[in-house]
Image (spheres, rainbow, N blue to C red):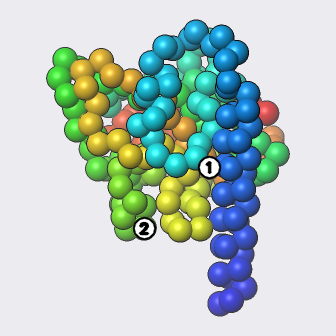
Amino acid sequence: MSMRFTGKARRGMVALAAVAGLALGSAACGGGGGDDKKPESSASASMASGSQPDPQEGQSQEPLAELKGPSGLNLQITAAVRDSGGFVTVSGAFKNDSGTVVTIPSALSGNETEIMNNGRSLGGATLVDSKSKKRYYVLRDTEGRPLTTTGFSTLKAGESIDVFLQFPSPPADTTDVSFQLPLFPSAVIKVSG
């Protein structure tokens, strides 16, 4: 049992160290480079709690996928980047396309007690590698918090927030995976890197 705990703790520490490194790197790089893509990004980024990589990093002009969910919610996936540390970071924007305030459904957090105890998140998301017949769940830190955008419960009409999710990396030869989020249709996305 102690070997199992040590393995889980080691994986959690590696994921936590990787997230901290990405957060420090994005903080060092984001200090005034004239990024005029989205003026609301700094205000919306403050809605998410915890350290996280800059969702603007590695984004392409054309989204990888756009998923339309309940109540006018829309998730646009702009990047899925494999890191040498053994994880994939999916990033994009979560938007309320309806004309009213929308409460974020708790189902998006998934049904695992440990994740639900950490508040609203996108912790219910998975990546499915049909080639290897494996499903990858959102990574967690050593305290069970999901490595995804957290801390949002409502979105005003037209409001958008930048989001990220981190998963274990599928094998290097796997480039197409299915992104799944409760209450949203699934979409096949390309993993780069």
Assign the C terminus to one quadrant of the image: top right
Q: Position of residue 123 (x, y in %)?
A: 45, 51
Three-letter amino acid code at the position of disc 1: Phe
Q: Does residue 43 lie above or below 117 as drawn?
A: above
Left or right: 9, with 113 as reference point: right
Assign the N terminus to one quadrant of the image: bottom right
Is 57 or 46 nearer to us in this picture?
Answer: 46
N-terminal of the pair, mark 2 or mark 1, is 2
Query: In which image quadrant can residue 33 be found?
Result: top right
Q: Position of residue 129 (x, y in %)?
A: 63, 46
Is 131 or 100 nearer to us in this picture?
Answer: 100
Is 110 or 37 nearer to us in this picture?
Answer: 37
Left or right: 121, with 10 as reference point: left
Q: Which residue is mark 1?
A: 167
Q: Does residue 126 lie above or below 6 as drawn?
A: above
**Element carrying mark 1:** strand
Q: Say which residue appears at 71% left-offset and 80% top-offset.
A: 6
Q: Say which residue appears at 17% left-offset and 23% top-offset.
A: 100
**Residue 81, numbered label:** none
Three-letter amino acid code at the position of disc 2: Glu
